[in-house]
Image (cartoon, helix red, strand yellow):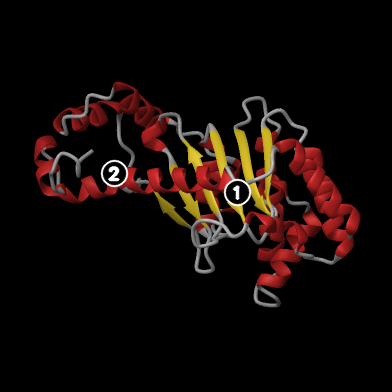
Amino acid sequence: MREAAGLNAREAAQTLGIDHTKISHMETARFGVSPDRIRVLAGCYGCTDTEYIDALIKLATDRKKGWWEDYRGVLPAGFLDLTELENKAKYLYSYQIGHIPGLTQTEEYARAIFDFGAPHRLPKRESEARIAHRIRRAHILTREDAPQVTALIHEAALRMRFGGADVTRRQLVHLLNISELPNCTFRVFTFEAEGFAGSGQSILYASGSVPKLDTVHLDSSHGPVFLDTEAQLTAYRQLLQTMEKRTLSASKSRDFIRKVAQEL
């Protein structure tokens, strides 16, 4: 809001009579912010989107700690940010090229991925914490207010044998079971689709309670990247929609996943 209004932090602080450093602390969530202050700032910034303002107030006044806070100081902060993003989202739309989606991974499959990606580098306590955390994340798929989930999965991810053929087969069967949930849709992007749009990285588009709170999460070897500008959100929505047009239908995707599992 502040940037859209063309104000810097010092100018914004003057409207509240506070030190300009507090504006930065509020914007990066290092300081809490009251509903009254949010409304005053929104007014100063010329924002009239009451739905957006109310959604921000709801986020700012939610003091209940999520279960992921149990891992604070044990796992990298990016892991916890991703988990909170998933838990706040109304809709999760993802694309995976190298792995089965994290929310649908079995424990043995997740263990194989972590063992492959960081062999002998992580202390056992942290390695086990990562696996337990990943499995626990999946609880959002079956909770009462579960988000709608759509995952575009490249055939390469289905055929990668993390942990060997048996582990992969059981993982694919697990994926098929989850596909029966009313809020989960999986669509396969086959090799016959002749390439794919984008750079080939994993993408997660999380829809917030209002469109302006949507966020894109990109997975990378150096940690997660979160994007939230309007231009970035538009670009990734279009990218995912372009790829979805080239995937198999949900029904044909289930048949394809079952066929790959049977071939293992």
Marks 1 and 2, how far apart at CA: 24 Å
Query: In terms of sequence position, does the residue under pointer 1 or pointer 2 come before the other?
Result: 2
Which residue in the structure is indicated by mark 1? 70
Q: Amino acid at mark 1?
A: Asp
**What residue occupies the far bottom of the structure in this picture?**
120
Q: Is 188 placed left or right of 61 in the picture?
A: right
**From this viewpoint, is residue 237 visible?**
yes
Quadrant showing the N terminus: top left
Please tell me whether residue 99 is drawn above or below residue 36 in the rendered image.
below
Q: Which mark is residue 26?
A: 2
The type of residue carrying mark 2 is Met
Q: Quadrant of the C terminus?
A: bottom right
Please provide percent x and percent y for residue 30: 34, 48
**In the image, what residue occupies the spot 65% across and 76% down?**
121
Q: Secondary structure at mark 2?
A: helix
Q: Residue at 87% x, 63% y: name it.
A: 165
Q: Secondary structure at mark 1?
A: helix
Residue 133 shows in the view: no
